[in-house]
Image (cartoon, rainbow, N blue to C red):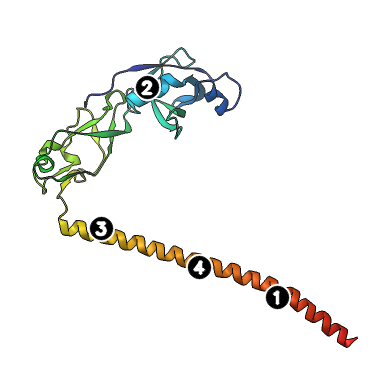
Amino acid sequence: MNQATENISLQVADRTTEGTAKTLRSKGIVPLILYGKKQEAQSLQTDSTTFTKLLHEHGTTTLLTLEDGPATGVKVLIREPQFDPVTNQVLHADLFAVNLTEKITATVPLVFEGESAAVEQLSGSLIESKAEVEVECLPQDIPHQLVVDVSKLATFEDVLHVSDLVIPDGVEVLDDPEEAIASVAEPRSEEELAALDEAVEEDVESIAAVEGKEGEEAAEGEEGAEGTEGAKPAEAAKGAEHAGDKE
C-alpha cells in the first residue's frame, strides 16, 4: 500500500541491566539508543523477540510511540538496525525522535506488482533497477512502501521511471524523476547463450591455468630452499678443510 504507516507502540525501559551488549542479548534484550534534534540521548532496552518481529513486519518507515519508559509518548523511527547474520535477530538499533511538524527524509522500499505482457507473453526478464527511493515529508506521512505496477511494461522498449510512481499527497520523492526503476530485457538467443557458455569455460580454464602455474612456482621455490639448506653444511665442511690446510 502507499498509505502512511499506522502508529504502533513500542514498550521500552531504562537500560538498567548490567553487563555488555552481548550479555543483554543473551537475556533476550535488545539495547537501544534514543536520540533526536531536541531529544537528550538515552540508553534504553526492549524485548528482543517483540522488537525483531515488529521490525521485520513494518520496517524502518513505521512511526512508533514509546511506552512504559522514561520517554513515554515520544514518537520515533527505527534507524540503523544491526542483525545477527545467522539468527537474523536484531543486535542493536537507534530510535530517532521526530517532530510531527517538521519534515524529514526517509528511504522507502519499492514493491513490484502486476504482470508484464513483455514477460508473460514475450518471455522477457523483468529488470528491477531500483529497490528504494528517498522521500521527504512529515514523519506521520511516510509511506510504508511504494508500489510499482509492472503491467505497464508491454514491450521491450517500455521503461518505468521514478516519475511514474504514484506518490501520496504531502510526499516528495528526491530521486531523479528520469531514473529508470523497471524494464524488461529480451530473451537471449541460442547464439548468445552459446557464446556466454564459451566465455565462462574460457574463464574457468584461465583461472585453472593461473592456479596451476602458481602451484608449480611454489613447489619450485620449496625445492630451491631445500637445495640451499643442503648446500650450507657442505660449504661449512669445505671451509673447515681450508682452515685445516692453513694450519
Residue highlighted by disc 4: 216
**Residue kind at label 1, given as amino acid type:** Ala
Q: Quadrant of the C terminus?
A: bottom right
* Whether residue 98 is visible: no
Label 3, secondary structure: give it. Answer: helix
Question: What is the CA distance from the residue labelled 2 to the residue labelled 3?
Answer: 45 Å
Mark positioned earlier in the residue sequence (3 or 1):
3
Label 1, secondary structure: give it. Answer: helix
Q: Quadrant of the N terminus?
A: top left
Residue highlighted by disc 3: 197
Label 4, secondary structure: give it. Answer: helix
Mark positioned earlier in the residue sequence (2 or 3):
2
- Residue extending furthest toward the top: 68
Mark positioned earlier in the residue sequence (4 or 1):
4
Question: What is the CA distance from the residue labelled 2 to the residue labelled 1?
Answer: 71 Å
* For discs 2 and 1, the disc positioned in front in the rendered view: 1
